[in-house]
Image (cartoon, coloured by chain):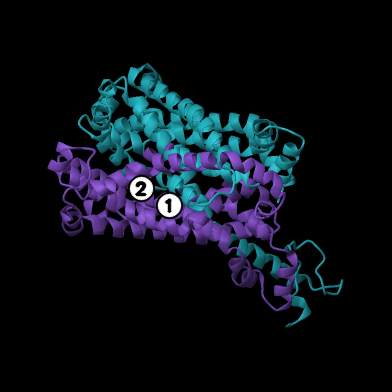
Chain colours: A cyan, B purple
Amino acid sequence: MTSASRIRDPIGDASAPPMGRRPDGRGSARRAETRRKWYEIVVLTTPALVLYVMFVLVPMGFAVYYSLYRWRGVGPPTDFVGIRNYVLAFQDPIFLDALRNNAIIVVGSLLIQGPLALGIALLLNRRFRGRAAFRLLVFVPYVLAEVTVGIMWKLLLTDDGTVNALLRSLGMGGLVQAWLADIHVVIWTLLFVLTWKYVGFAIILLLAGLSNVPPELTEAAAIDGASWWQTQRHVTLPLLGPTIRIWMFLSMIGSLQVFDMIWVTSVPSMRSLGASATMATYMVDNGFFARLWGFGNAVAVILFVISFVAALLFQRFLLRRDIRGATTERVN
Amino acid sequence: MTVAANPVRYPSTRHRALSWSTPLTYALALAVAGVSITPIVYVIIGGFRTTPQIVADPAGLPDPWVWDNYVRVLAHSHFWRQTFNSAVIALGTTFLVVVLGMAAAFVLARYTFRGREALYTFFTLGLLFPAGAAILPLYLLLRNLSLINSYYAVILPQVAFSLPLTVVILRPFLSAIPGELEDAAAIDGAGRIGFLWRIALPLSRPALVTVGVLAFVASWNAFLLPLLVLGDVDLHTLPLGVQSFSNQYSTDTAGILAFTSLAMLPALLFFTLAEKQIVGGLQGAIKG
C-alpha cells in the first residue's frame, strides 16, 4: 500500500467523491486523474475503433456512393447514373434467379435443418456412452472450410462420380442425375450439401440449449403422467425457444450471404444461367470479374439492405424478448 | 449445466425413460454421425487410390493402397506454402482480434464515462454489417491503400469484422469481475492498467480463448476475401489452394482427393483440440 491517494473509485467515475481523501481535496490531482483516465480510454479503444470504422463502416458508405455511378473502376467515378444500376439489377432475370435461389436456400435451410435438428437433439438429449464422440463427429462438417467441403461434394456428385455409381449399384439408376450440371436440379443439390454441412451446427446449438433445461421440470412432468412426447411439447420445447430463434437468425443471415459453396461446386455456366447464382456470386461475377464496379456495388447495397432489414425485422419481432430475458433472468 | 451434471438424481424415472429407447438412441446417433462423417472418410481413403481405380469403380476401396497421391501433393504442390500463408494470416488475425477486442471491451466494461453506451452500441452495430456485402468496396479501399497482395489485406478486414462479436462476448465477462478485486488491486498500488494486465486478463482466459478460436476458425476457412485480394499465387491460402488445384488438375481425381484431405487435416486437428471451446463458446453466446 503506497498512499491513500492511490485508491480510486472502483468504477473509475471521476465525479464520485474520491475515497480516502479529505473533502477539501486537491482539485489538480483529481483533474490529473481524469485526464489519465481519458488518456487510457483513448489509447485502449482507438486501434479497435479505427479498424472497425475503416474496414466495416467506410466500405459500406462507399458502396452506396459507387453504386450511383457507371464506373469501370479506373480513375474516380464521373458518370453519375442515379439509381439506374439498381433498376438494371432488378430487370436482369439472372439477378431475379439469384434472389429466388437465395430465398430457396433461406426457407429450405429453416424448414429442413430446423425440424431435423430439433428431432435429433430431443431424441439424443440423454447421457449415453460416446455422446462426446458423437458431438465431435456431427460438428466436423461445420468446422471444415466451405470450399474444401464443396470440392469434396463436387467430386462425389459428378456425372460418373460416387453418388451416381452408388445409386446404380443399388438398383436405383432411375435417380441418377447430373447433380451439379442440370439447371433444374443444381439448386436442390446445393441445398442438400448446405444442409449436410450446417445441420450439425443446429444440433449442437440445440443440445447446448437442452443442457440448460433443468431436469427437474421434465421429471416432474413425467411423474405427473405426461408421455415423452407431451413432455417435449409442453416443457422442453418452450424452454428451447430462445436457442431456436437464435439459430434461425444465424441460419437466415448465413443463407443470404452464401458464396463459397456455390462458387466452387457449380460450373460458371450454371451461375451465368441463373440456375445456381446467389446474390453474392452475382455480385462478385459482375462487380469484380466483369469489372462493372458501379453495378456490382449496387448489388452489394441490395444484398446489404435485404440482410439488414431481415435482421432488424427478426430482432424486432422474435429476438428482443430473448435478449431481454437473457440479461434479466438467466437460469445459471 | 451444474444441474445436468448430476447423474444420480431421480434414478427411477431416468431408468424407465431409458430402458426402451436406448437402442434407438444409439441407432440414431450412429446414423447421424455416419451421415456426417462418411463422405469425409471416403475422400480421405479415396486419396489412396489411383484415378483409373476410381474411374473403374467410384465407390470401391483402394486396391492396392497407394501413397503416391499424398506424396505428390506434399512434395510438388504449393501445399506447404499455402499452409504457411493460412497459418500466418489466421494467427495474425487471432492475435489482433484478441488484443484489440480485449482493450476495447475492457474500457467498455470497467470505465465509466460519458458516451460509453453510445460507443458500445456503435460497436454492436457492426453485427448487422454482413462482410459479404462489403467485399467490393473493401477491395477498392485496399487497392487505394496499396495493400492488395499482402497479408494485411486479409488480416485487417478480418479483424475489423470480428471485433463487434468479440466485444459483445468479452464485455459482460469483464463486467462480471467483482469490483472488490479492482479495489484490492488499487490498494496494492495497481492502476486500472495494472488491474487489466494482472487480474482481468488471467480471469478472462476462457472468454479470450473462445473469441480467439472463433476468429481463428473463421480466418482459416475464409475464401471470398482472399480470393479477391490475394492474386499472387505465392500468397494463396489453403482454401484458395484447394480450389485452384481442383481446377488446374481437374482430371486427376485421386490427386484432388488427396489434396482436399490434406487441406482438411489441419482444421480437423485444430478442431479436435479446440472442440470444447467452440461448443462452450456457442453455448455462452446463446446464454447471452
Task: Report x, y in % for residue B74.
Answer: 21, 58
**Residue farthest to the right, as pictured:** A23
What count of labels does the image hold? 2
Q: Is mark 2 on a helix, strand or loop?
A: helix
**Residue B169 visible to the viewer:** yes
**Residue farthest to the bottom, as pictured:** A2
The residue sitting at 38% across, 54% down in the picture is: B268
Three-letter amino acid code at disc 2?
Answer: Leu
Quarter of image, res A314:
top right
Q: Mark 2 points at which residue?
A: B142
Q: Mark 2 packing: few (<14 Cα in 10 Å), some, or many (20+)?
A: many
The residue sitting at 25% across, 58% down in the picture is: B81
Q: What element carries label 1?
A: helix
Q: In this view, does A230 lie to the left or right of A158?
A: right
The chain letter for the residue carrying disc 1 is B
Q: Mark 1 points at which residue?
A: B217
Is tag 2's residue or tag 1's residue first in the polypeptide sequence? Answer: 2
Quarter of image, res A209:
top right
C-alpha distance separating marks 2 and 1: 23 Å
Q: Is residue B84 left or right of residue A235?
A: left
Task: Report x, y in % for residue B92.
Answer: 40, 60
- Compared with A64, B99 (above or below) is below
**Residue A70 visible to the viewer:** no
Task: Report x, y in % for residue B8.
Answer: 68, 54
